[in-house]
Image (cartoon, grey):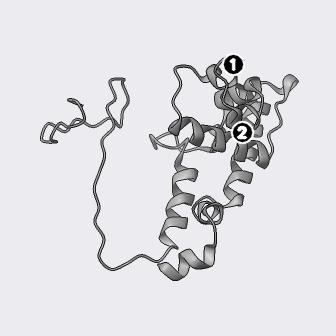
């Protein structure tokens, strides 16, 4: 494992080992395709760089929390690390149309068909990374009160983190 980390060289190289550039190209293609299918007269063309920028913003927002997405671009609070990457309107448009699979050719019986290509590619990449023989695995259940077919209730799970 240490040899792999040494050969990768940087955090960005390690990130691209798990999320290869081809994945961003495919997401850009699927998002543009969805835009064409839903609103052909007002095509929203998406490039690989747009998806990389979008993911960078989302990752940063997951670390530095503000009450509203628009706060990252506001004149009073604004976070330059996010605001300088892309305009707020482009970010929100991408957030509303981002797609990972073609809705027209997807298996509607698969409850996760919209994100299956993303999950499969990330699993493929993770399986290509060598791992040590002794691993410790833990799980994290995220509190969710909404409705979804894959939501799972686990009454035996110990409640921590303030009662979640």
Place residue 131 in its image quadrant: bottom left
Q: CA distance from mark 1 to mark 2?
A: 27 Å
Q: Residue furthest front?
A: 76
Question: x%, y% of residue 147?
Answer: 36, 24
Q: Residue furthest left?
A: 156
Question: x%, y% of residue 19?
Answer: 61, 58
37 to the left or right of 147? right
Q: Report the residue marked by disc 2.
A: 31
Most foreground residue, 127 or 110? 127
| Picture layout, residue 82 above or below residue 74 | below
Question: x%, y% of residue 124?
Answer: 53, 66
User: Residue 146 — which label?
Assistant: none
Q: Residue at x 78, y 47 (%)?
A: 49
Q: Residue furthest bottom?
A: 3
Place residue 96 in its image quadrant: top right
Q: Residue at x 74, y 45 (%)?
A: 28
161 to the left or right of 30? left
Place residue 95 in its image quadrant: top right
Q: Dot 1: what SS?
A: loop
Most foreground residue, 65 or 97? 65
How many residues crowd around disc 2 within 10 Å: few (fewer than 14), some, or many (20 or more)? many
Most foreground residue, 35 or 74? 74
Q: Report the residue marked by disc 1.
A: 74
Q: Dot 2: what SS?
A: helix
Q: Indicate the quadrant containing the C terminus: top left, top right, bottom left or bottom right.
A: top left
Q: Residue at x 60, y 62 (%)?
A: 11
| Picture layout, residue 72 above or below residue 49 | above
């Amino acid at each position: 494992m240490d040899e792999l980390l040494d050969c990768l060289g940087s955090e960005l190289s390690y990130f691209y080992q798990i999320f290869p550039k081809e994945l961003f190209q495919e997401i850009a293609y699927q998002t543009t395709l969805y835009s064409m299918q839903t609103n052909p007269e007002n095509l929203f063309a998406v490039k690989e760089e747009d998806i990389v920028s979008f993911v960078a913003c989302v990752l940063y927002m997951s670390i530095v929390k503000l009450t509203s997405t628009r706060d990252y671009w506001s004149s009073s609070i604004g976070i330059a690390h996010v605001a300088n990457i892309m305009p707020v309107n482009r970010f929100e448009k991408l957030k509303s149309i981002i797609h990972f699979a073609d809705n027209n050719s997807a298996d509607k019986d698969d409850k996760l068909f919209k994100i299956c290509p993303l999950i499969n590619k990330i699993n493929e990449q993770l399986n290509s990374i060598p791992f040590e023989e002794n691993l410790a695995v833990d799980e994290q259940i995220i509190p969710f009160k909404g409705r979804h077919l894959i939501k799972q209730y686990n009454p035996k799970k110990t409640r921590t983190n303030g009662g979640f």
